[in-house]
Amino acid sequence: MMNKITGIKSVDFKITASGEGVVNWNGSTELEILIKGEYKKVNNHSLPKLRGYSNKITRINKKTGKNFEGIKRPDDIDFQETPLYISQNCIRHHLFKDENFNLQDPQVAKEMEKLLCSITGLIRGYVIPKKEYKRTSALLITDFIETTKNGNFEQMTTSGSKAKQETKSGTDKSNSMFSKTTFGKTKYEAYASISIEQLQFISLDDQYSRQAMEPNNETEAKDIALKISKYLQDIGNDEKAEAIYHKNYVRKGSIFTNEAHGEAGILLNDNAIDVLVSQMKFLLENLAFRQAKGWMIVDGIKVDYNNSSLAKNMFRIKKESSDTQKNKGDVKYAIYFEGMKS
C-alpha cells in the first residue's frame, strides 16, 4: 500500500453574506407579458443571473390538447429551482481588485517576480499566453447562491411627450414599457477552498506544462525564492516564512525521482502557507462591494483546516460534519513535494 500524505490538505470556508438588490445581471431575455389582457412576447425584460434558468417552457394547447414549446411568463420563474446567484468570476474580481495587473502588458512577462510576490500571483493564479507561463489557482470558490428566494416582477414605463419627441424614423414616440425581475433584501451562501498542494509549489520548469516563470539561471531562481520569502515575511510579520528553491522537486510517491522526472521550483514552508491562508481568510471576511445598483457584504465565515485522508471528507464543511477543525493547532500542512538529489 502507498504511504498516504498526512497533514492539512485544504483549508475550507463556508461563507454567509447579505445585501440588497441585484449585483449581477444577465441582460435582457424574451418573456410573455400580459398587456391589455393578452400575453405578448417582449424582449426587453431584464433578468438577473439565475442558476439553471431557461426561458423555454412546455405548455398545452387548450384547443388541441397537444404540448408545444412556449416562452416563460414572469410567474413561471421558480426561485426555488433557479435561484439568484452572484457568479464566482464576479466574486474573484472583487476579492483581488486591489492588486491591479494587466496580464496582456508585455512588461509583466519581463518582471514575473513582481507578479509572484503578490496575492494574485500566489493564490489567484494567472496565465501569460505569450510566454506560456501559468499558475493554477489554489482557490476554489463557488457561486454565491441567494437563499431567501424572494424575487419580484416589476413592470415599468418610460413616458415621452408625443408632441416633443420623435423616433429616428420621424414617427411619434409612444410610451415604452419594460420590465425587470428584481430583489429586495438578499442573503447568500457560498463555499471556498484553498488547495495546499496547488498553493505550496511554484514550478520553474516546463516539464509538466505548469511553469510559473523561466529564470535565466539557478542564481536568479534562488534570488526569486528570496524575494518571495521577504514578501511573505513582510505581509505576515513572520520571519520563519520561507520560499525554498531546489532544482529537483519530485511529488511524493513518484516512482522515478531523478532530475529527468522532477522539476526545478520553489516550495513554500509551513509558515509561508500559513501567511497566505491568513491573507485569504482576511479577504473573504472583509469582502463587500456595490455594483449594478445593488450591494453585498460578507457577514461571516466558518473555517475547516481539513486534514482528513478519507475521500468522503472532502469539503466536509458543506456537510456540516462534526469533524471540522476550526483552528490549525499543532497540525502541519501536508507536504506534497520534496527536493531529491539528482
Image (cartoon, rainbow, N blue to C red):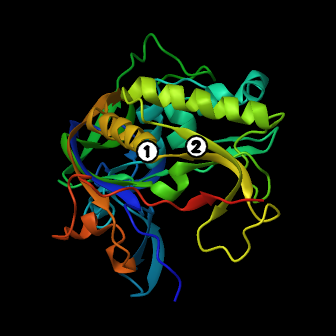
Tell me which numbered mark, 1 or 2, is placed earlier along the sequence: 2
**Residue 31 visible to the viewer:** yes
In this view, the residue in front, 89 or 61, is: 89
> From what the image shows, is residue 22 above or below residue 99?
below
11 in relation to 319, above or below: above
Image quarter of residue 331: bottom left
Residue 125: mark in rendering = 2
Q: Residue at x 77, y 66 (%)?
A: 258
Which residue bears the numbered disc 1?
273
- Camera-nearest residue between 157 and 230: 230
Q: Amino acid at mark 2?
A: Gly
> Dots 1 and 2: beta carbons under 8 Å?
no
Task: Give the Cα distance between marks 1 and 2.
Answer: 15 Å
Q: Would residue 20 be found to the left or right of residue 31 on screen?
A: left
Viewer-proximal residue among 256 and 167? 256
| x and y percentages locating residue 315 in the rendered image | 34, 66
Q: Residue furthest top?
A: 164
For the C terminus, the image quarter is: bottom right
Tell me residue 180's x, y (percent).
Answer: 33, 42
Q: Position of residue 65 (x, y in %)?
A: 39, 88
Q: Is residue 7 above or below residue 178?
A: below
Amino acid type of disc 1?
A: Ile
Q: Assess disc 1: are there few (<14), some (14-19) or many (≥20) residues with their C-alpha within 10 Å of its C-alpha.
A: many
Q: Residue at x 83, y 63 (%)?
A: 260
Circle 2 packing at 10 Å, graded few (<14), some (14-19), many (20+), is some
